[in-house]
Amino acid sequence: MLTQRSFRDVLGRFTTGVVLVTARTEDRLAGMAANSFTSVSLDPPLIALCAAHTSTTWPLIRSSGGFAVTILSDHHEEVCRLFSTPGADRFAGRTWASTPSGHPVLPDGLGWLDCRIQSVQRAGDHELVIAEAVDWNVAAAGVPLIFHSGRYAGWPPDFL
């Protein structure tokens, strides 16, 4: 039988990277974890991500007009879980750097992108966001945090 659960199970077989999407809003920092993130175009430099309509964080980020994306390393599983927990104090107890636009990024991430929202389109129970990367930085090599079949893992080191 085709159900929402079986659809989710099938999609879970597709291994994804994990990122933090963060922004400095008018009065606070906002951030969420996402695995629905991908590159779209090199010229211009565009990325896409999806945010659930049920998210209480995405409207704060969207209202700022831009955000940062931190690409997570395998040692970021705890912070990723924290940024997936509703109501958690996500920015406390950790050192943050800032992009040129002022959005927070993890200084020990594999890399970051500073993005400006270009379009937001309703897509089922999510919003599809297209954003232009206006600045970015690649950090030292590391093992990425990945998500597969509902679990976090690190990419095997022999693939690096």
Image: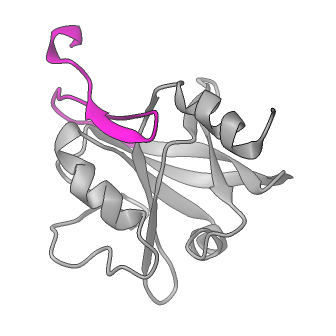
Relative side of 50 to 38, left or right: right
> Can residue 152 be spotted in the picture?
yes
- The relative height of residue 67 versus residue 85 in the rendered view (above or below) is above
Q: x, y (%) of residue 94? A: 16, 69
The residue sitting at 52% across, 85% down in the picture is: 26
Q: Is-magenta flag for residue 151?
A: yes
> Can residue 105 be spotted in the picture?
no
Q: Quadrant of residue 68?
A: bottom left
Q: Is-magenta flag for residue 130?
A: no
Quadrant placement of the C terminus: top left
Q: x, y (%) of residue 12? A: 54, 33
Q: Which residue is nearer to you in this view: 85 or 49?
A: 85
Q: x, y (%) of residue 127? A: 75, 55
Q: Looking at the image, which residue sits at the far bottom?
A: 27
Q: Looking at the image, which residue sits at the far front?
A: 1
The residue sitting at 60% across, 76% down in the picture is: 56
Relative side of 109 to 33, left or right: left
Q: x, y (%) of residue 91? A: 28, 74
The residue sitting at 78% across, 56% down in the picture is: 125
Q: How is the image coloured?
A: one colour
The residue sitting at 61% across, 44% down in the picture is: 132
Task: Count numbered badges in the picture.
Answer: 0
What range is drawn magenta here? 136-160
Quadrant placement of the N terminus: top right
Q: Quadrant of residue 47?
A: top right
